[in-house]
């Protein structure tokens, strides 16, 4: 079941790759998580790079994204735009992780 426009978080923009639906419990999930991941790597590249550098992480991939979701909200920077980008990485992964289980 797709979400209505007012249920879609603003940080996801209005891109087809970020199309959301609801799982059987009413939790928002990406309709195509792989495509959403690829688009997020483009849209949030500055935040991903800052997280990777500050926390000395391996390059992001579909198999090692969880630390990026955790550390995005913990980034230390005086650059407000970069901090917002990092927070959006964490927000994205909150939805992304829901897309792989029906819980």
Image (tube, grey):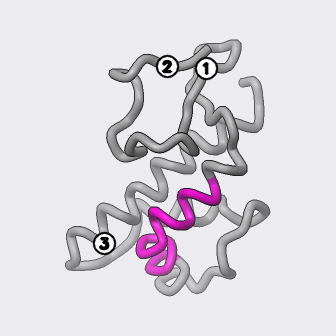
Q: Is residue 85 left or right of residue 43?
A: left
Q: Which residue is mark 3?
A: 82
Check residue 52 in the rendering and tell me which mark sits there, or answer none: none
x and y percent of residue 24 in the render?
A: 70, 13
Check residue 22 in the rendering and tell me which mark sits there, or answer none: 1
Q: Residues within 10 Å of mark 2 (few under 14, many from 20)?
A: some
Vertical side of 39 occupied by 29: above or below:
above
- Determine the residue positioned at 40% across, 65% down: 86
- Check if mark 2's residue and mark 1's residue have beta carbons within 8 Å: yes
- Determine the residue positioned at 42% across, 75% down: 46
x and y percent of residue 65 in the render?
A: 66, 62
Residue closest to the eye, 68 or 35: 35
Marks 3, 2: nearer the viewer: 2
Helix, strand or loop at disc 2? loop
Q: Is residue 68 located in the magenta-colored stretch of the structure? A: no
Q: Which residue is mark 2?
A: 3
Q: Earlier in the sequence, mark 2 or mark 1?
A: 2
């Amino acid at each position: 079941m797709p979400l209505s426009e007012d249920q879609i978080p603003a940080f996801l923009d209005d891109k087809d790759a970020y199309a959301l639906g609801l799982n059987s419990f009413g939790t928002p999930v990406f309709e195509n998580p792989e495509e959403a991941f690829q688009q997020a790597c483009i849209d949030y590249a500055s935040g991903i790079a800052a997280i990777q550098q500050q926390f000395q992480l391996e390059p992001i991939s579909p198999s090692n994204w969880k630390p990026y979701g955790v550390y995005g909200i913990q980034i230390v920077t005086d650059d407000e735009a970069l901090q917002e980008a990092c927070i959006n990485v964490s927000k994205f992964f909150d939805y992304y992780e829901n897309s792989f289980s029906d819980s």
